[in-house]
């Protein structure tokens, strides 16, 4: 439905977006993940028509739209800090796009009520923007973006400014709202957990380039490069014969060597020294160093060792990625 | 110094200064104008049809000046808001030059423009027409709109307008629906200031309006100085003062509503068409550069060729002036240095009270300090003339009363440059300094002073330039003949007939213009403050 090919966005001499190819199917949610400054916001702005393309094309339903003005594109964009109109109330914000499409007043009111209901803010219509909490402002921004019925919505770090518990709640709600309106979405985030939770597919962007796109589990299991592995949260990179391999952080099993008997434990294929242990709730994060000087990090759901312990390390060869 | 004595000094210095040199003289004018024995003069003033038409003209020319200035200045503000902050600073500094030029210089320049273009005396004559007055007001106040609205605009988050665009608003719709409402406080504040300045404009109307065009301001001058009819002058001044007071209160209200904006983190450089910026640059070049270049050209013209003869002649003694023009320039520089120093000191104290004072006091200072900005210079000069005339305050002939009167007009500029800078200091920085072991006076020295110094310097530069060109108040104050200031000398040269004097007048104008421009450009370009109001 939405097809980007060879899209380039420049700011002066720097390429913020560098020849990106991307396809979005109807009703699909694609999560774009990447470090801040990787060009993902610029890509959204370009798709919305707010940045001119320095190269490439954007097609929507088989029609080129890259020279269409932003107000003529059936695309919604939700901004990072919401960019709500502070001089209008909640209903005024949600109705804005409808007014631009010259909806009748009665239908506007109905649609606004419908959307406020959908995002859980029924009855908030006359509230001033300044009185909203962060989560409420976020929902108003979502309702405003969805109200005119865009074919595609672009969500630019919509949960970035919220606290953790609210973010987790909205991660649950957002797909429901998008499904209810059957809207395709590109969701930009720097948080890989958010991307995994929301994306039917995920795309990894680094330095303006889209390095890999695919279903979350597949991208996680088979990152095409170290950069992708790094963005997705793989922390244990080991160079073997000059070829890096990635040990997935939750993949290893640990055997804690508390006495000599444990040394001979079957399967422990190397011995390491525990350097740091951090309590992480359900698990402990353990930093260890191999005798070759390689540092590794693991999440451990068992009784954690103490710093300075020698422990035996068992690694499932199935779970090692060779790049 | 203890906290208490510091407070006494900070509140006391501006309070005494304003009570003595502003409130007292102005109240004397009011008392003379509205007092019982003056009721008749006031009644005559209000009922006289000539004065009513003067009042009407004063009002509508100010309104027309404001509308025209907005019409020319808003597109320019739009362009300025899109520039990189370095270019923004440069443009702001350059457009500020006309704003600080002496009114008499500008009036002279516009008169020359008429002569050069043949509009002075041909089939189409604009001499003494309201159009020239309006053009001169736009010339002056362009900077007010470009600076006030431009910097406010630059501070608005672009993405709100982008949100409107994505929701289907066309460019002009997004502007009308989203940008304009958010700009409204800045536009209102700029309009109020432009209206005030045009309402109380003196030199421009006196020189360009001719005998038929009078505003309240020039009428006060004519009655007080030319006709020596002090009761009528006082009655007129009272009427004007009340009108200005009402406007200042409204203006202050409007400014108070201006929210504080932080700059958006990222503003994309946009490749939009060049038509808009180039068009505005041309308008600014013709409007601002035209009169200035005509002035420079005329000052260098000698008979058929060009030379520096007019400048050399500034050192000569001529019958129309009590001292050579060059001496007048020296006098003006001395006065301006003293005035700027006094304004800086008083303005600094007042700004600290406005920023850190208790709510009520801060509010009162804020309002009180806007008053001299709007009160006509003529009223201030007139007030000093009639109030400070007997012991123990028989000061009107002392050498320092002129710089003090100038400082009075300069203080609001200092406060308006400094207060926004001081307010922009994140309180967390002060707290951090305190936590790191700095006692309050040290916090002030380490945080407020270095950051505020630039705002203070800009304000002092304004005060210096304003004093250099001050004409209205100075025209009232009796001086030793050899202490004549340059704008007064220039006025005399401009109103005396003769081509030779005209050349000298142009040369003197260029010298004054150069000094004022130098002061402002130096301080503006050297400062990083983008938040000042002017």
Image (spheres, coloured by chain):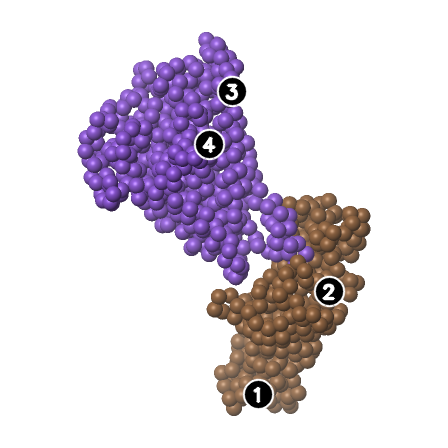
Where A12 sits versus B312, above or below?
Answer: below
Q: Residues within 10 Å of mark 2 (few under 14, many from 20)?
A: many
Considering every residue shown, the one lying at the far left of the view is B316
* Same-subunit check for callouts 4 and 1: no
Q: Does residue A115 sit above or below B457 in this rendering?
A: below
Which numbered dot is residue B52? 3
Of the residues tagged 4 and 1, which is closer to the observer?
A: 4
- Provide residue A279's location: percent of width, then percent of height: 61, 69
Q: Look at 49% across and 13% down and name the residue there.
A: B44
- Tag 2, which secondary structure? loop
Q: CA distance from mark 1 to mark 2?
A: 54 Å
Q: Looking at the image, which is closer to me, B251 or B282?
A: B282
Circles 4 and 3 on the same chain: yes
Query: Label 2, on which residue?
Result: A151
Occupied quadrant, residue B514: top left
Of all chains in the rendering, the one displayed in brown is: A
Q: Which residue is mark 1?
A: A270
> Looking at this view, is B202 or B186 the one in front?
B202
Q: CA distance from mark 2 to mark 4?
A: 57 Å
Report which quarter residue A214 is drawn in: bottom right
Q: Quadrant of the N terminus of chain A?
A: bottom right
Mark 1 touches mark 2? (CB < 8 Å): no
At which x and y percent is residue B8?
40, 30
Numbered label attached to residue B130: 4
Q: Quadrant of residue A156?
A: bottom right
Q: How far is disc 4 from disc 3 in space, using C-alphas?
A: 18 Å
Q: Residues within 10 Å of mark 1 (few under 14, many from 20)?
A: few
* Point 53% across, 86% down: residue: A239
Chain on which label 3 sits: B
3D distance between C-alphas at marks 4 and 1 = 95 Å
């Amino acid at each position: 439905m939405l097809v980007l090919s060879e899209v380039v966005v420049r700011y002066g001499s720097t390429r913020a977006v560098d020849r990106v190819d991307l396809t979005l199917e109807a009703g699909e949610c694609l999560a774009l993940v990447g470090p801040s400054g990787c060009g993902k916001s610029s890509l959204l702005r370009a798709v919305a028509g707010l940045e001119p393309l320095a190269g490439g094309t954007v097609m929507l339903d088989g029609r080129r739209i890259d020279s269409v003005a932003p107000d003529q594109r059936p695309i919604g964009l939700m901004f990072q800090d919401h960019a709500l109109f502070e001089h209008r109330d909640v209903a005024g914000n949600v109705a804005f796009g409808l007014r631009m499409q010259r909806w009748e007043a009665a239908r506007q009111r109905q649609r606004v009520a419908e959307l406020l209901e959908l995002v859980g803010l029924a009855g908030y219509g006359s509230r001033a923007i300044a009185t909203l909490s962060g989560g409420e402002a976020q929902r108003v921004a979502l309702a405003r973006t969805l109200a005119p019925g865009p074919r595609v919505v672009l969500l630019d770090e919509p949960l970035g400014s919220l606290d953790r518990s609210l973010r987790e709640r909205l991660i649950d709600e957002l797909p429901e709202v998008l499904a209810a309106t059957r809207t395709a979405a590109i969701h930009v985030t720097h948080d890989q957990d958010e991307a995994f939770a929301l994306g039917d597919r995920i795309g990894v962007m680094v330095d303006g380039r889209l390095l890999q796109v695919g279903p979350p589990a597949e991208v996680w299991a088979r990152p095409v490069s170290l950069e992708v592995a790094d963005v997705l949260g793989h922390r244990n990179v080991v160079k073997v014969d000059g070829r890096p391999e990635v040990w997935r952080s939750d993949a290893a099993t640990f055997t804690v060597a508390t006495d000599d008997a444990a040394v001979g434990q079957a399967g422990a294929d190397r011995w390491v020294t525990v350097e740091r242990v951090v309590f992480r709730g359900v698990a402990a994060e353990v930093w260890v160093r191999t005798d070759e000087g390689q540092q590794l990090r693991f999440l451990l759901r068992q009784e954690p060792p103490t710093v300075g312990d020698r422990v035996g390390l068992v690694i499932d060869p199935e779970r090692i990625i060779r790049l | 110094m203890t906290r208490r004595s510091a407070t006494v000094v900070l509140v006391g210095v501006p309070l005494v200064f304003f009570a003595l040199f502003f409130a007292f003289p102005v109240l004397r004018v009011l008392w003379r104008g509205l007092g019982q024995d003056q009721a008749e003069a006031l009644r005559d003033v209000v009922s006289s049809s000539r004065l009513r038409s003067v009042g009407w003209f004063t009002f509508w020319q100010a309104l027309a000046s404001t509308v025209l200035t907005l019409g020319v200045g808003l597109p320019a503000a739009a362009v300025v808001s899109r520039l990189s902050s370095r270019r923004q600073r440069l443009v702001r500094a350059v457009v500020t030059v006309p704003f600080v030029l002496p009114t008499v210089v500008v009036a002279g320049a516009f008169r020359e423009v008429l002569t050069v273009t043949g509009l002075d005396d041909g089939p189409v004559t604009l001499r003494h027409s309201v159009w020239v007055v309006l053009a001169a007001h736009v010339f002056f106040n362009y900077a007010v709109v470009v600076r006030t609205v431009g910097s406010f605009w630059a501070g608005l988050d672009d993405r709100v307008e982008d949100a409107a665009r994505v929701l289907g608003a066309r460019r002009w719709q997004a502007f009308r629906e989203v940008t304009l409402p958010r700009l409204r406080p800045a536009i209102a504040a700029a309009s109020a200031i432009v209206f005030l300045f045009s309402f109380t404009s003196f030199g421009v109307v006196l020189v360009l309006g001719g005998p038929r065009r009078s505003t309240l301001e020039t009428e006060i001058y004519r009655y007080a100085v030319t006709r020596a009819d002090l009761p009528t002058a006082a009655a007129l001044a009272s009427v004007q003062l009340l009108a200005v007071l009402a406007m200042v209160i409204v203006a202050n209200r409007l400014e108070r509503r201006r929210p504080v904006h932080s700059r958006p983190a990222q503003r994309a450089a946009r490749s939009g068409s060049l038509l808009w910026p180039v068009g505005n640059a041309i308008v600014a070049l013709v409007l601002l550069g035209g009169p200035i270049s005509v002035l420079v050209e005329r000052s260098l013209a000698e008979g058929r060729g060009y030379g520096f003869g007019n400048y050399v002649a500034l050192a000569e003694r001529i019958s129309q002036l009590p001292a050579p023009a060059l001496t007048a320039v020296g006098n003006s520089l001395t006065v301006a240095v003293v005035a700027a120093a006094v304004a800086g000191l008083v303005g600094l104290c007042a700004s600290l009270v406005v920023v850190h004072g208790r709510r009520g006091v801060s509010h009162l200072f804020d309002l009180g300090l806007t008053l001299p900005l709007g009160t006509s210079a003529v009223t201030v000069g007139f007030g000093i003339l009639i109030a400070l005339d007997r012991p123990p305050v028989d000061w009107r002939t002392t050498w320092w009363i002129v710089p003090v009167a100038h400082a009075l007009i300069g203080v609001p500029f200092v406060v308006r440059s400094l207060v926004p800078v001081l307010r922009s200091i994140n309180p967390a920085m002060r707290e951090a300094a305190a936590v790191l072991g700095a006692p309050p006076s040290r916090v002030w020295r380490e945080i407020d002073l270095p950051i505020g110094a630039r705002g203070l310097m800009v304000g002092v530069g304004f005060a210096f330039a304003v004093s250099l060109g001050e004409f209205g108040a100075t025209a009232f104050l009796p001086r030793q003949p050899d202490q004549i200031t340059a704008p007064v000398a220039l006025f005399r040269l401009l109103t005396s007939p003769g081509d030779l004097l005209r050349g000298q007048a142009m040369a003197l104008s260029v010298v004054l213009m150069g000094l004022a421009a130098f002061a402002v450009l130096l301080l503006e370009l050297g400062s990083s403050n983008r938040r000042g109001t002017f």
